[in-house]
Image: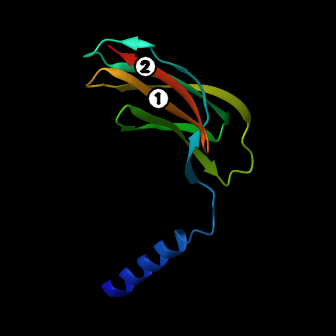
Amino acid sequence: MRRTILILVMVAAAISCSGDEEDGLIVTEPMYSVSVEIPDTISLGEQINYMAQASLLNACEHYSHLAQSAYGHETYVTLYKNRHIGHEYCADEVTTIEAIGAYHPNVVGTYTFNFWRTEGEFLIREVVVR
């Protein structure tokens, strides 16, 4: 009896998660950085704080997160959105979001920040650390 119930539960779960329906599917995608506020110069020991703006194009898009990767004096920043797939209608409503990030340099020099726009295109800003 328990085995029959377990099999029925497993079959019901497999049918409900078949993946045939896309309603509710969420895809995470990079966002086009529209503008950036970042200082030109800071002193060693200070943190580089920045604010990047990007636009969500409709009601089915929501800000997800900011990813930052540093390689020496070069930092790459990408904003991400979650986009709901399978909805028949998503109201056009452009919303500007602001994402805040920080980087703590450990040596003096010029640091280059590359904010992702599209494949191979970045909004580039430099910060001098004295």
Give yes or no for contact between labels 1 and 2 (Cβ–Cβ under 8 Å).
Answer: yes
Q: Using the rendered view, name the quadrant where residue 69 is placed.
A: top left
Q: Is residue 128 or residue 63 the one in the foreground? A: 128
Name the residue tied to disc 1.
113
Q: Which mark is residue 102?
A: none
Asked if residue 1 can be seen in this view, the reply is no
Name the residue tied to disc 2.
127
* Amino acid bearing label 2: Val
In the image, taking residue 90 as reference, residue 26 lies left or right, namely: left
Residue 38: x %, y % from top left: 47, 17
The quadrant of the picture occupied by the N terminus is: bottom left
Q: Secondary structure at mark 2?
A: strand
Q: Is residue 128 above or below residue 76?
A: above
Residue 79: x %, y % from top left: 51, 36
Q: Is residue 14 above or below residue 106?
A: below
Q: Using the rendered view, name the quadrant where residue 36 is placed.
A: top right
Say which residue appears at 54% left-offset and 74% top-offset: 15
Q: Is residue 110 or residue 3 the one in the foreground? A: 110
Q: Using the rendered view, name the quadrant where residue 86 is placed.
A: bottom right
Q: Is residue 98 or residue 68 the one in the foreground? A: 68
Say which residue appears at 71% left-offset and 31% top-offset: 93
Q: Secondary structure at mark 1?
A: strand
Q: Mark 1 vs mark 2: which is more N-terminal?
A: 1
Asked if residue 111 can be seen in this view, the reply is yes
Q: Is residue 113 or residue 12 the one in the foreground? A: 113
Residue 34: x %, y % from top left: 62, 27
Q: Residues within 10 Å of mark 2 (few under 14, many from 20)?
A: some
In the image, taking residue 41 as reference, residue 85 lies left or right, namely: right
